[in-house]
Image (cartoon, rainbow, N blue to C red):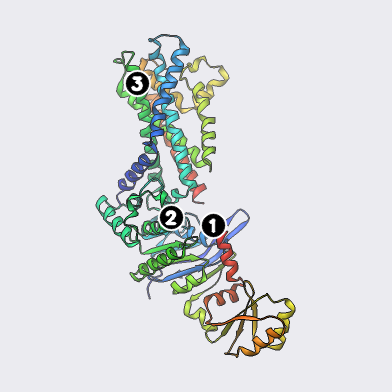
Amino acid sequence: MKTWIPLFAILSKDMKAYYLKPPNISWGLIFPFAWTGMFFIRSGGGIGGIMELLPGVTALSILFGTTSMLAVTVTFEKKSRSFDRLLLSPITLETLMLAKTSGAILFGVANAVVPVLMAMLFIDVSGVSWPLFAAAAILIAVVSAFLGLFVAVAVSEVFEAQTFSNFIRFPMVFLCGLFFPVQSLPVFLRPLAYALPVTYGADLLRRAILGTGMMNQWMNISILTGYCTVLFFLTVKNVRRRWIS
Amino acid sequence: MNEPIVLATSLQKRFGNITAVQDASFSIEPGEFFGFLGPNGAGKTTTINMLTGLARPDSGRLSIAGIECTGNVKAAQHLIGVVPDESNLYPELTGLDNLAFCGALYGMGRTARKERAALLLESVGLAEAGRRKFGGYSRGMKRKLTIAAGIIHEPPILFLDEPTTGIDVESARHIRKLISDLHATGTTVFLTTHYIEEAERLCSRVAFIVNGRVVRQDSLENLLAPVKGVSILSLCSTRSLEEADLAALSRSFPRYVFNPEKGNALSVQSEEAFPISPLVAFLEERGFPVLEAVRRRPSLEDVFVSVTGIGSEQMKKEGKK
């Protein structure tokens, strides 16, 4: 069987049924706009401060956009039992999970573009390393999608998915170096910051946009890839244990 | 002799302390119409889930079309079509898009799945509704489309879980006709139902499952053989009989078996044909005017009741739960 046919069908179905719905598109636009505005006003750094804020806002947009949608759509489909239809088809669980996350990844990457486009209206972004920015955006979207999937598989209700997602996402806002450097955190919180994948994504974005970062870019990419792999296989294992038990 | 298309040996499934299916063994021949009959909670859906890949048996063996797939039905899922007990298609997609999507899940190319979807919409009587969203369909229409989705890839085996439960009479009749036509084209059908008359009408072989155990399985002909010569009379009165009245009836007519039925009805069963008038006279003497007396042929329901001790009314009531 040609694996790409069901994979692409699931992706385009999810796009049509969930991601390209007007409320989600407006969420994708309004959310980064609100975050950028809020941090810009709070920082008091003037127009020049936008560049400093851009990595954090971009990472945040991807994280929230991706995890919100995926956790809810998977939980909703499981609840309505339409997910069973996917489990009954002759595609491997790995392919199915990749197909389900690919929509969220694309949505997350699209969310990353919004703050950049907004920043372009005010500042010169010619110094940004776009290949590195793209790599960072994709890796944050992938790791966020797998985090969302991990949450979706762990819960059974849509509201639980939202609540559980927030327990993971909001600490990341403060711990992952999005707006405050990890080095400025209290010493006892730093190990937690280094245990969260978005820390490395935000660092990669910082390097792409500002040219500085805590770690070497290849180190960040390797760690993020490692997180993606571990989360993906953990989720697949969880699906087997919980949904095909 | 052909190799069984489904061979289940001693399947067992527990959920915590509850044994949902216990030592279930059966085989289904290619082209057979196999009925799996039992009340709610008997283990029908768990069995279907194990056969189709939604649940993993704790023990036992399973092979489908000669493919050993105990613990991993994936290898045989391309041969299986499943119609679940709930219509679980996507409310946001049209009927046509839903079918085309299901075709894509089985690797069908764009043109092939669009053509097949259009053909199926026509055959299930939803050609016009195909452009409308599934969420706006009536319950009967949803069931028909769900059946169409189950056969989009033309599977040699179709599993149907309670296909006519909760829908109107006309739609149920249409669905039974669809299933029957499908079977006539050579598709092997595995049907779970709690409608005994539906199983009797459609199936060539039937298994009874109660409390997770397959208590009896045989061809319809063999199951009905012991009751073939039995004579059954249904009497309807203005009020129901008390225990004492039933005891008096049994004393006066020792060769007959009396079973109270729903409402004020009473079934009378005998190994041979018997006259009605002495019974009617006896009942009327005791203040039970007989409003109706109908002779009927013995059915699968009578066999089911005698094997399982569960009445058809109880089955129907449980089906509505």
Relative to A23, does residue B113 appear above or below in the rendering?
below
Disc nearest the viewer among 1 and 3: 3
Q: Residues within 10 Å of mark 3 (few under 14, many from 20)?
A: some
Q: Is residue A138 visible?
A: no
Disc 2 marks which amino acid? Ser
Q: Mark 2 — on which chain does it sit?
A: B
Residue B19 screen position, x and y as percent: 60, 59
The residue closer to the viewer here, B25 or A119, is A119
Q: Mark 3 — on which chain does it sit?
A: A
- Name the residue that disc number 1 marks: B58
Disc 3 marks which amino acid? Val
In which quadrant of the rendered view does residue B154 lie?
A: bottom left
Disc nearest the viewer among 2 and 1: 2
Relative to A209, does residue B188 appear above or below in the rendering?
below
Relative to B287, does residue A12 appear above or below in the rendering?
above
Q: Which residue is painted at 63% across and 55% down in the image?
A: B17
The residue closer to the viewer here, A185 or A157, is A157
Tag 1 near tag 3, CB within 8 Å: no
Separation of marks 1 and 3 at Cα, in angstroms = 53 Å
Separation of marks 2 and 3 at Cα, in angstroms = 47 Å
Q: Which residue is painted at 44% across and 52% down in the image?
A: B88
Q: Is residue B13 visible?
A: yes
Residue most extreme to the right: B244
- Name the residue that disc number 2 marks: B138
Q: Mark 1 — on which chain does it sit?
A: B
Residue B178 screen position, x and y as percent: 38, 66
Separation of marks 2 and 1 at Cα, in angstroms = 38 Å
Q: Residues within 10 Å of mark 1 (few under 14, many from 20)?
A: some
- Name the residue that disc number 3 marks: A116
Q: Could you tell me which secondary element the residue under label 3 belongs to?
A: helix
Tag 2 near tag 3, CB within 8 Å: no
Q: Could you tell me which secondary element the residue under label 2 belongs to?
A: loop
